[in-house]
Image (cartoon, rainbow, N blue to C red):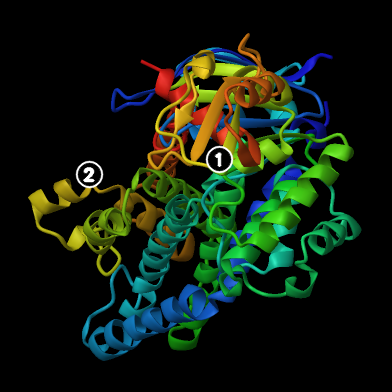
Amino acid sequence: MPSILSISGVSKTYATGFTALKEVNLDIQRGEIFALLGPNGAGKTTLISIVCGIVNRSSGTVTVDGHDINKDYRAARSLIGLVPQELTIDAFESVWATVNYSRGLFGRPANPAFVEKVLRDLSLWDKKDSKAITLSGGMKRRLMIAKALSHEPRILFLDEPTAGVDVELRQDMWAMVRRLREDGVTIILTTHYIEEAEAMADRVGVINRGEIILVEDKAELMLKLGRKEVRLELRAPLGSVPDGLSRYALELSPDGSQLTYTYDNQSDRPGVASLIRDLEAAGVQFRDLDTKNSSLEEIFVNLLRQEP
Amino acid sequence: MNLRAAMNLRAVWAIYRVEMARAFRTVLQSIISPVISTSLYFVVFGSAIGSRITEIDGISYGAFIVPGLIMLSLLTQSISNASFAIYFPKFVGSIYELLSAPVSYLEIVIAYVGGAATKSIILGLIILATASLFVPLHIEHPFWMLAFLILTAVTFSLFGFIIGIWAKSFEQLQLVPLLIVTPLTFLGGSFYSIHMLPGIWKTITLFNPVVYLISGFRWSFYGKADVSVGISLGMTLVFLAVCIAIVAWIFRTGYRLRN
């Protein structure tokens, strides 16, 4: 499938001399949910800002659905909706006015029925005549999304969309993102909540110190880099791990009551069934067994730790 | 290619409408307050002090200061409207939306400068109407009066737009209007004819661009000017061209917008 967004060799050095992006290459597939992960200052927002036309790049090319973001900026930008990290709204405008302003700014003809639908979908309809300044933080976040959706974009950038929002709103937003994807909208989100990326994303990209260090299908990434952990609660504490179990590199808790076996999903190390047989042979009995897959968050942290 | 296809006119209209809505939302600050302060000028300079001043070029002092007072408001309001209009989104961060929209530099300038100029032209006309309550007014060249009014409003709105992009703080936003524009306007012949100045000061005053604006505008009222009307018009157009060139450079380089 052709990519809807293609970033090629993009670098950005600010006037201060700080290099925020180094030769970034990234292709986003049409209709996917792509999570761009990275620690603070990794370059996520700079990358998004370049694609959206807010920041000039130092070098490289970006095309949106085949349109160069400089030469054909009108076509490129009209396809993009952006929800920035900060709640930046003209505080004295009403909800209705500011969303219609956004639609007009993107050159779309007035469509009150569509704007009403967007506001209803985001539970903002009751607040349509309220000034933005009177809205709660969560409502302001919804308003930012309504503004971004007002011109019916085909690509939606969500920069830290759920930072500082309550659980209910976060779930509402996840549901909204899924609905948008069903309508064919491509979604690129950055988030600190890795669980969010784990729950939503089709693909994951990790950026660190201005470089993309990994782009992978989420399921494959978790399979490839994920680890499994088996924890056994022993009937009787052990003084040490029996010699017959040495090939498992088991970890014994300080009080001797728990054994932990960790292995990579793709490693050649023996599986749980073999461990249980060997435990029986060694006369080690357990009363409970717990297995856990490593989360995307753990994979992410491990990836960053491996970086020089 | 027709204009609608070549330009994002809806965006121009959206920005313009928001700017005008802001003026009506803050009508006290935008319109009533300058009208009150201008009326006070008429009371103090036109009636109280002006009654003791002889006519200048055959014009009563009260009537003589009308074009200068309108220019004073027009310049300060054009600068303040346009500088605030672009600085405020920068300050609160909502400029992201403008920069990420399919809007050309020209469209942004037309919308913001158009909004700011419209507001100050309306204000200038209101002051003119207010002035007619205090002094008998006579406009000899109404077309040129309107032409100078529009040209000055547009030029100084562009100048304000540049200040709004340059400013990094509210202090800087006020700096140029307070320290440069207001003194130049007061010393630009708002309240006197530059022929009343002693030799060297008369020459120095000719370096003040506001002299040409006020002189040309006064000529459109009374047919009398400190400097030739052609030079006045030329100097106004030169200042307009300089502002356009600076705005073009700002957008080409992304100066304090996209960096």
Q: Nearer the viewer, residue B18 or B207?
A: B18
Residue A279's disc is none
| Residue A172 picture location, percent across and down | 75, 57
Q: Nearer the viewer, residue B44 or A251?
A: A251
The residue that mark 1 highlights is A234
Residue B215 figure quarter: bottom left
Please tell me which residue is depicted at 44% across the width and 24% down the height of the picture.
A304
Provide the secondary structure element on which disc 1 rests.
strand
Q: Classify A38 as above or below B210.
A: above
Q: Nearer the viewer, residue A290 or B114?
A: A290
Please tell me which residue is depicted at 74% across the width and 49% down the height of the picture.
A174
| Residue A148 picture location, percent across and down | 70, 47
Provide the secondary structure element on which disc 2 rests.
loop
In the rendered view of the protein, which quadrant contains the N terminus of chain B? top right
The residue that mark 2 highlights is B207
| Residue A30 picture location, percent across and down | 80, 24
